[in-house]
Amino acid sequence: MIEIAGMIYTLTAAWLSLYGLLGLITLALYIRHRRQKDLVPAVPADGWPRVTVQLPVYNEPNVVKRLIETAVSLDYPRHCLEIQIVDDSTDHTTHIASELVAAYRKKGFNIHLIHRNNRNGYKAGALAAALKKATGDFIAIFDADFKLPADFLRRTIPYFLADPRLGLVQARWGHLNDTQSPFTAAQAIALDKHFALEQTVRYRANLFPRFNGTGGVWRRQCIEEAGGWLDDTVCEDLCLSIRAIKHNWRFLYLPDVVTPAELPPSILAFKSQQARWTKGTIQCLRKYGWTILSSREHSWLARFYALLSMTAYVTHLLVLILFLLQLPLIYYDFQFSRGMIIFSLIGLGQPLLFGLSQQLLYRDWRRRLMYLPLLLVVAIGTAVANTRAILEALTNQKNIFIRTPKQGNSPHPLPTSAHLDWGILVEISLTIYALLGILIAWNKNSFHATGILFTCGLGFGYTAWQSLREIHLNHQARQTTPIQSLGK
C-alpha cells in the first residue's frame, strides 16, 4: 500500500514540475522576443472614433467616486466619448454614482448610469446589457478598483485604426497599494510576473493571448462577432478571448501602458478573488480545451502553453496531495528515488520568473523580492479555497460571482459577510497535521520532509489566522459602526 502512495507522490511531483517547465519555456521565449516592439501608429488625421467606457460596479461605495472622476478626466475628445456606469448595486453606491453622473452631465459629459435591479449573468450579464445601449465602436472596460490614466485612450485607440483585424488592446496592471502591507507587496510580485513576462510572451509568440477582464479596449465588432458576453462561466474575460481568437481576431498587449489598480488588503477578499479566477479558468478549460487542442491555426507549442497555463491552478490541488502524503510516507520510512531532485530543479522555473519580473519593472527590485517567501506562504494557504473551486468547476456547481471588496479610502475594507466557514476549519486542521508530521519526521530522523511540512503548515496557519482575525475585526466593526442610510 505504501508503494502505491509513493508512486502517487512521484507522479504528483512530476506533474508539478511541468509548471516549472512552463516557467523555463516562458523565460526562453521572453529572451527570444524581448526586443520585439510594436510601432506606435500615428494619431488619426481624420478624427478620433467613438469610444464607450464601461465601468461595471456592484456595491462599491468606497471607490466608485474615484473611478468616475478618473473616467471623466480622460484626455479624449468629449464629443467622441461615452461613459457608462454599469451598476448592479444594492447599497448606497447607486446613490453616490447617480449624484456624480447628474453633476457631470450638467458639465457636458456624455455619461450614463445603467442600473439593473437584478444580477442576472453577474458581470457578463451587466456588460451585455450595457453594450446594447452603447454608442461607441470601441469599448474600454475598467473595474471599480482601477484608476484610468488620462492618456489611456490616446495611447491605445490608434492601434485599432492601423489594423482592422485588431480586436483587443490590453494594458499592464499597475498597483495603487503595493506598499500598504507585506501582504499586498507579495500579491504585486505574482501579478507582475504575469503581466511583465507571461502576457508579453503570449502576445509576441502568439500563444493564445487573453483579456484580463479590465484595463483593456475591445473593438465592438470583435465582441459581437465572437458571440458577445456569456455568463456560463465566472471567467467571462477568458471565455470571450478564446472565442475571439477562434474567429481570427488579433490581440495586442502594451506593457508600457499601465493601469493602476487596488490589491485586496484582506485575506478573505483575496481568497474569494483567487477562488473565482480558479473556478472560471477550469470552467473555460472544460468548455474550450478540445477547441484549443485541435486548433490547426496554432502551433503545438501554442496549444501546449495555453492548455498548461489554464491548468496552472491545479497546482493547489497537487500541493495538497503532496502534503497529505508526507505523514504516511514518513511513518513507513518510504525511500524516495534520488531522481526526485530533477523535479525540484525544473521547479525553479517559476521563481526565476518572479525575480526577473521585479528586475525588469523596478529599480528597488531586491527590496521587493524580500516578500517572495510570503507569496509562497500565501499561495499554499489558498490551496484549500482553490481546490474547492476546482471541484466546483469540475462538478458543474452553480455559478455565484462573489465580488472582491475594495478598500479605497475606507478604514474598513473587510467583507461585510465575513464568517467562519468549513474552509477555515480545514486550514486549521491542516496546520495541526503539519505540526504532527514535523514531530514524526524529527522522531524518525526524516529531516528531508520537514521543509514541505513546515512551509505548508506556515501557509495554512497564516491563512487561517488572518481569516479568523479579519472575521473578529469585522464583527467588532459591525457592532460599533452605525448603519449608513441610503442617502449618505
Image (cartoon, rainbow, N blue to C red):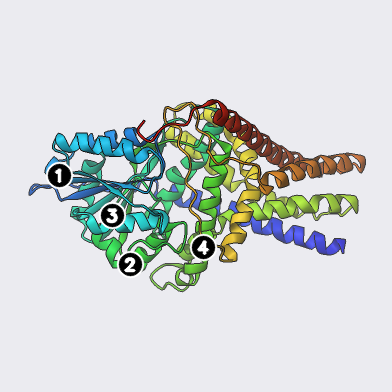
For disc 1, the marked residue is 43
Give the alpha-carbon distance from disc 3 to disc 4, as whole Å: 25 Å
Report the mark closest to the observer, 2 or 3: 3
Query: On the image, numbered disc 2 is attached to which residue?
Result: 227
Q: Amino acid at mark 2?
A: Gly
Label 3 vs 4, first from the N-terminus:
3
Alpha carbon distance from label 4 to label 1: 40 Å
On the image, which quarter does residue 282 sit in? bottom right
Residue plotted at (77% across, 52% down): 324
Amino acid type for the residue under numbered disc 1:
Val
In whole angstroms, how far apart are the C-alphas of marks 4 and 2?
A: 18 Å
Indicate which label's residue lies in the foreground, 3 or 4.
Answer: 3
Compared to 21, does 462 lie above or below?
above
Q: Foreground residue, 240 or 293?
A: 240
Q: As rendered, which of 231 and 336 lies closer to the eye?
A: 231
Left or right of 203? Residue 348 is: right
Q: Quadrant of the C terminus?
A: top left
Asked whether disc 4 touches disc 1, contact meaning CB atoms under 8 Å apart, the reply is no
**SS of the residue under disc 3:** helix
Work out whether mark 4 precedes mark 1 in sequence or the reverse, and give the earlier one: 1
Instruction: Answer above or below: position of 470 versus 290.
Output: above
**Depth-wise, is mark 3 or mark 1 nearer the camera?**
3
The residue indicated by pointer 3 is: 130
Say which amino acid is labelled 3. Ala
**Mark 3 to mark 1 CA distance (whole Å):** 29 Å
Q: Is residue 437 visible?
A: yes
Q: Which residue is mark 4?
A: 283
Q: Residues within 10 Å of mark 2 (few under 14, many from 20)?
A: few
Location of residue 331 with respect to 397 vertically, above or below: above
